[in-house]
Amino acid sequence: MMIVQAEQKPVTLPQGSLRILVVDDGKNAADILAMFFEMEGHVVQVAYDGSVAVELAERFRPQLIVMDIGMPQMDGLEASRRIRRQAEGKEIIIIALSGLDQDDDKRSCAEAGINHHMAKPVRPDDLRTVIRDFQEGA
């Protein structure tokens, strides 16, 4: 995984690659998801809480964020709202990963500016499909 530095130089991406930010307070889950995306050829950074995700999104400029919703310091809904207010935040695709999969949960995600909601545990093929759909629509 990439180490985040105070100031980063722009990253040149290989064809078909995305800059992806994985946000989850479960470090093992976040790291495994990051490894999956790296094996798929993407450039990945990880944040283990929502407030770090907000700061990192501004510097790293991800094209896609996979955001856990239930985090203790700042939940994924609030982090998504704050990211959307950033200069380039409206352009980022945000995918919520949540253990909650009720209509109210999906509505809360949509109101926070989240593009897509996926229930945990998520299957690799489902992630690939969402990413492919994003790339084809981008």
Image (cartoon, grey):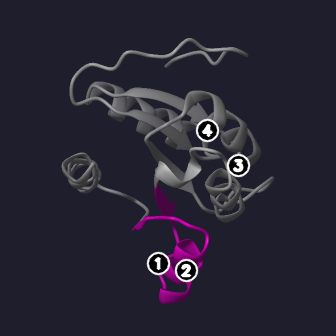
The residues tagged by marks 4 and 3 sit, at their Cα atoms, a distance apart of 10 Å
Q: Which mark is residue 101?
A: 1
Q: Nearer the viewer, residue 75 or 94?
A: 94
Residue type of the residue flagged with mark 3: Gly
Image quadrant where residue 63 sits? top left
Q: Which residue is mark 4?
A: 57
Q: Residue at x 50, y 16 (%)?
A: 10
Q: Which residue is mark 2?
A: 105
Assign a secondary structure to mark 2: helix
Q: Which residue is mark 3?
A: 50
Q: Name above or below for residue 83 compared with residue 18.
A: below
> How crowded is the residue under tag 1: few (<14 C-alpha within 10 Å), some, or many (20+)?
few
CB under 8 Å between discs 2 and 1: yes
In the image, the segment drawn in magenta is 94-118
Q: Which mark is residue 56?
A: none
CB under 8 Å between discs 2 and 3: no
Residue 101 in magenta stretch: yes
Residue type of the residue flagged with mark 4: Ala
Assign a secondary structure to mark 3: helix
Q: Residue at x 52, y 17 (%)?
A: 2
> How crowded is the residue under tag 4: few (<14 C-alpha within 10 Å), some, or many (20+)?
many
In the picture as drawn, the residue positioned furthest to the right comes out as: 73
Q: Name above or below for residue 29 compared with residue 59.
A: below
The residues tagged by marks 2 and 1 sit, at their Cα atoms, a distance apart of 6 Å
Residue 100 in magenta stretch: yes
N-terminal-most mark, 2 or 4? 4
N-terminal-most mark, 1 or 4? 4
Residue type of the residue flagged with mark 2: Asp
Q: Nearer the viewer, residue 82 or 131?
A: 82
Q: Nearer the viewer, mark 2 or mark 4?
A: 4
